[in-house]
Image (cartoon, rainbow, N blue to C red):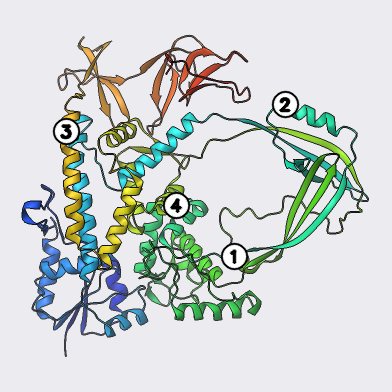
Amino acid sequence: MAKYLVIVESPAKVKTIKKFLGKNYEVMASNGHVRDLPKSSLGFSPEEDYEPKYITIRGKGDVLAKLRKEVKKADKVYLATDPDREGEAISWHLTKALKLEDKKVSRISFNEITKNAVTASLKNPREIDMDLVDAQQTRRMLDRMVGYKISPLLWAKVKRGLSAGRVQSVALRIVCDREEEIEAFIPEEYWTLEAALLPKGEKKPILARLVEYKGEKIEIASEEQMNGVLAQLEGKSFAVQDVKKGERVKKAPLPFTTSTLQQEAYKALNFPISKTMRIAQQLYEGVDIKGQGTVGLITYLRTDSVRISDEADEAARVFVEQNYGAQYLSVGEGKKKSDSKIQDAHEAIRPTSIERTPAEVKDSLSRDQFRLYQLIWKRFAASRMANAVYETTAVGIAAGDYRFRVSTSQLAFDGFKLAYTEADDDEGDKQVLLKSIGTDTKLSLVELEPKQHFTQPPAHYTEGSLVKTLEELGIGRPSTYSPTITTILARRYITKENKNLYVTEMGAVVNSIMKASFPTIVDERFTANMESLLDSVADGEVPWKSVVANMYPDIEAAVQEAEQELTKVTIEDEVTDEICEACGRNMVIKYGPHGKFLACPGFPDCRNTKPYYEKIGVACPECGRDVVIKTTKKGRRYYGCIGYPDCEFMSWARPVEKKCPRCGSYMVDKGSRLACSDTHCGYTEAKTESEN
């Protein structure tokens, strides 16, 4: 009997796949990559025509030895690594590391780990797709160029252990730019006016908002303006001018891609991106289900396609019709607008069987596995269901030259909402509007409610919104979002507090060096264009060496120029007036994981350290002592009194000595302007030349 060897990436898949195949099949795992460029050098050069020099990854010797032993016994080898560029590259590396050139070797791939998918792939083996291998190889080499050329400069000029990366540096810049935008934001005052009106014969008033004056949109910017409006409305009668009834459709959601799954799991389940990917990997590779054995519950988790196979689509439609009713079936299939960045090789993320409901597998899953599986299952079911329909009513109400409006919507048909509701869905009615209201309805004014508001700065990025931005800008690919965010968090370039991402002092330093010395690397358009080039390599349209050869000289030149420029910048230990209590030396400023600190220069003989507080030359508004720069435990910068805990003054924005001429509060620096720290005051002024 012929012997076959199937090689997968993950040991977790071995058990799942083995039960689908006969006794003449052996299934083994490579445990991911087996070869890579050497850690000690770049691994390629223009002098050798950019040919990469691969070596066996340390620790993979035993794995390869076991695989070689099984290869000798096998009549044919199937390479069943993941169905993406990285998986294709691993298969290619395995052919080299195991010297499979003289063996019967086939590449097989499957989008889900089910018996049908695995056996179908064995019936349709293929050659390794070298275009996909070249695209992955090019990505690795480009990342190497940035990391290995630029990181040593950061080590020399800032701190060892720092790193630059082609995608991570752009992600850091995006967060830094948002922080600068927030810091420079100056709130603007505006007012709204609502009228509480009681229709005749009713007990509960309706709330109508002021929207127009003499047919033009009205904007009220101050209390004085609002008082003028209130004066003109005094004694005016309110009358229904028109009633418009209509219908609004909310489309069923598309099934999950990697990016949308990460975003929704973050919002709905509070899962960090890395946790979502880890649990999704477990669901994909297989979980022991009572009565069924090890089962792959979802399809491949790294995809930016919303396509669904005909078989899965048909099965879902049958399920929806039988369990919800024919009226809940969608008409046609939801489509996403064509996008050149979409790689349609994979399906969207979906359950491998719609019949395997969350309730059925709940007892076999951990709490987090169940919650993520339920989210994926519900989203897929909803994607095959009908749209939700709302009845809308808009009522125009006149009062002199002013026009008020009240709008509401009532759910007429729940459609897909019967199965699934998105985490940020706020479709709930704010108020119930009487269906009987018409132009002859009499209204009496209960009260006018003026409200003061201030515009809000852009929101801080969260992991979810950062992923959304990276995807929209075309930076990175589904497989890169999680490691990118994990890396800049691990390097302490950014920190996370209450879901929000903030730039640390170290992150700001690295970003400023990258922007000044390597503007191209941190340019989002350049990085997105590189992704497009990698897609062209994968499609066989562009030779991979031409991409590397075009990039290498530019990065090399930028590094050499930066080396010359940065040699002028020597970051030495700054000596302070602070005396070490242990040995009497003047303490120096050092960089640590959380920013600057004071250390004795006598290390290792004297190991005394203490916090370093940089004075900003401003007296504390509350006690008169110095305001200093501090950082939270997670590295976020703020301004506080050096007298803490006796004085608890703190400010996220940088205080200045000047007091607000309107209310007397301290003022803060907002980039080109100074603003009152009391947002209810709203006073701002331009900086003088000396203040700039």
Mark 3 is on which residue type?
Answer: Glu
Q: CA distance from mark 2 to mark 3?
A: 57 Å
Question: In terms of depth relative to the viewer, which is nearer, 446 or 592?
Answer: 446
User: Which circle's residue, 1 or 3, is located before the other in the chain?
Assistant: 1
Q: CA distance from mark 4 to mark 2?
A: 39 Å
The residue where tag 4 is placed is 468
Left or right: 28 with respect to 382?
Answer: left
For label 3, the crowd category at 10 Å Cα-Cα, with few meaning under 14, some 14 to 19 and many 20 or more, is: some
User: Which circle's residue, 2 or 3, is located before the other in the chain?
Assistant: 2
User: Which circle's residue, 1 or 2, is located before the other in the chain?
Assistant: 2
Q: Secondary structure at mark 3?
A: helix
Mark 2 is on which residue type?
Answer: Glu
Quadrant, the N terminus: bottom left
Q: CA distance from mark 1 to mark 3?
A: 54 Å
Q: Secondary structure at mark 2?
A: helix
- The quadrant in which residue 228 appears is top right
Label 2 with label 3: CB-CB less than 8 Å: no
Residue 31 in view in this figure: no
Q: Is residue 125 above or below residue 572?
A: below
Q: Residue at x 35, y 48 (%)?
A: 525
* Discs 4/2, front: 2
Q: Secondary structure at mark 1?
A: loop
Q: CA distance from mark 1 to mark 2?
A: 41 Å
The residue where tag 3 is placed is 563
The residue where tag 2 is placed is 223
In this view, which residue lies farthest toward the bottom? 1
